[in-house]
Amino acid sequence: MAKRKTRPPLTKTRQQWAEQRNGATFKGLPLHYNAAVESRYRESIQRLVELMGKAYARELKAVFNEYGGELTQDASIASQARIKLNKLYDRFYKRFAKEAPSIVDRFFGGVDKASAASLGMSLKELSGGVTLKANVMPATLVEAVTAATAENVALIKSIPEQYFTQIQGAVMRSIQPGGNGLADVTEALQKYDAMSMGRAKLIARDQTRKVTTAMNTERAKALGIKKFEWIHSGGGAEPRKEHVRMDGKIFSYDDPPVIDSKTGERGFPGQLINCRCVARPVVSFGEEGE
């Protein structure tokens, strides 16, 4: 029979503190997402987007200026535009692919540090001043981080692919009958530059919340925290009804609630895209295993 794992003995002070609170429920501080980490991640991606947008604008303008005239009657501009677009795509796909791993590594390092600090402060509040080692890295967290790393790299690499498809379509439409040539392309570049910047912002915000949630969840479970309170953010224009109803309710980390009634997906605050809700660790003294 396998040897049963036991917790290390409590110090006399901590044991007295726990005994005095037998049957009581205590909550830690809410586990908020780190805005500075999100900002640095967003800026790193947007820097690449800005470089890409400027290069497309500069080089496409050169093509139109060289092969101007009656656009609908000149096939050379279409040919040269395709050649230039393909070169731009190849250049920036490689650039994004090359830089994505290091950008993601820095991002995860920031989330890791912020998660450990936030969870440590929360558990210190919950345990009456007892400091717990919150920077643990259980095997389940290693697996989650590995998967999330691949997802983030793929998201960054998808930006130049989507941008190329959008601009290519705009360029070809601009030289068709009724098109306005460079004027149409310039307008499209402004539109899709803004969209790509917005996408970078969404990736940074969404992934900061998801990765932080995953780290906090696995670390809390590894430290023996079994429950959490759902705290609804109240900041969204169209809040999810399920999340509003869950505000203030306590759930088990091992049996999380349904966070999307349409799909039946279960999970934690911050897991769904644009979810601003946060978790608060909870311990109920006197319950079995606590």
Image (cartoon, grey):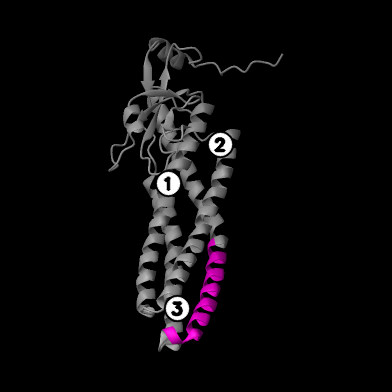
* Whether residue 138 can be seen here: no
Vertical comparison of 151 with 245: above or below: below
Q: Amino acid at mark 3?
A: Leu
Which residue is denoted by mark 3 in the rendering?
60
Mark 2 and mark 1 residues within 8 Å of each other at the beta carbon = no
Q: Earlier in the sequence, mark 1 or mark 3?
A: 3
Mark 1 and mark 3 residues within 8 Å of each other at the beta carbon = no
Which residue is denoted by mark 2 in the rendering?
141
Q: Amino acid at mark 2?
A: Leu
Asked which secondary structure carries label 1, the reply is: helix
**Magenta stretch bounds:** 72-96
Between 162 and 213, the residue placed more toward the observer is: 162
**x and y percentages locating residue 210 in the rendered image:** 46, 41
Mark 3 and mark 2 residues within 8 Å of each other at the beta carbon = no
Which residue is denoted by mark 1 in the rendering?
206
**x and y percentages locating residue 30 in the rendered image:** 36, 32
Find the residue positioned furthest to the right. Answer: 1
Residue 57: quarter of image: bottom left
